Image (spheres, rainbow, N blue to C red):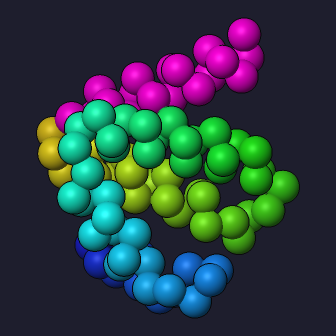
């Protein structure tokens, strides 16, 4: 499945998911790192809502890191969130 197929359709607010993908693609590495941390935390917080936009947004952030060849950005964001949440 291609990235575009994976994110077809609209988010829970009715906006195309592609808008978020474009926003993420235009972020600097520092902005992407902050976005990853934010979406990872929010996705964990919304774990009781499987339809939350935060879940696919985390995937989109991870995909963007992979596309850039910078998976370490996502990995570090995950570690930071885990450390802060789990102590």
Residue at x 69% of width, y 66% of height: 52
Residue 63 percent location from the top left of the image: 32, 53
Location of residue 29 in the rendering, given as x and y in whole percent from the top left corner: 24, 38
Q: Quadrant of residue 4?
A: bottom left
Quadrant in the rendering for residue 44: top right
Query: Is residue 23 magenta-colored?
Result: no
Which region is colored magenta? 70-87
Determine if the magenta segment contains residue 71: yes
Q: Quadrant of residue 54?
A: bottom right
> Which image quarter holds the C terminus?
top right
Residue lying at 65% horizontally and 49% vertically, measured from the top left: 43
Q: Main secondary structure of the magenta part?
A: helix
| Closer to the camera in the image, 4 or 16 | 16
Q: On the rendered image, what quadrant is the N terminus found in?
A: bottom left
Q: Is residue 49 left or right of residue 80?
A: right
- At x 51%, y 20%, the residue is 79
Residue 82 x %, y % = 62, 22
Give percent across and percent down for residue 41: 63, 39
> Does residue 66 appear in the picture of this structure?
no
Q: Is residue 78 left or right of residue 31?
A: right
């Amino acid at each position: 499945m291609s990235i575009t197929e994976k994110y077809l359709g609209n988010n829970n607010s009715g906006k195309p998911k592609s808008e978020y993908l474009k926003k993420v693609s235009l972020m600097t590495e520092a902005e992407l790192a902050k976005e990853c941390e934010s979406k990872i935390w929010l996705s964990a917080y919304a774990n009781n809502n499987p339809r939350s936009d935060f879940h696919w947004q985390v995937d989109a952030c991870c995909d963007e890191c992979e596309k850039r060849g910078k998976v370490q950005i996502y990995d570090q964001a995950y570690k930071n969130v885990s450390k802060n949440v789990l102590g």
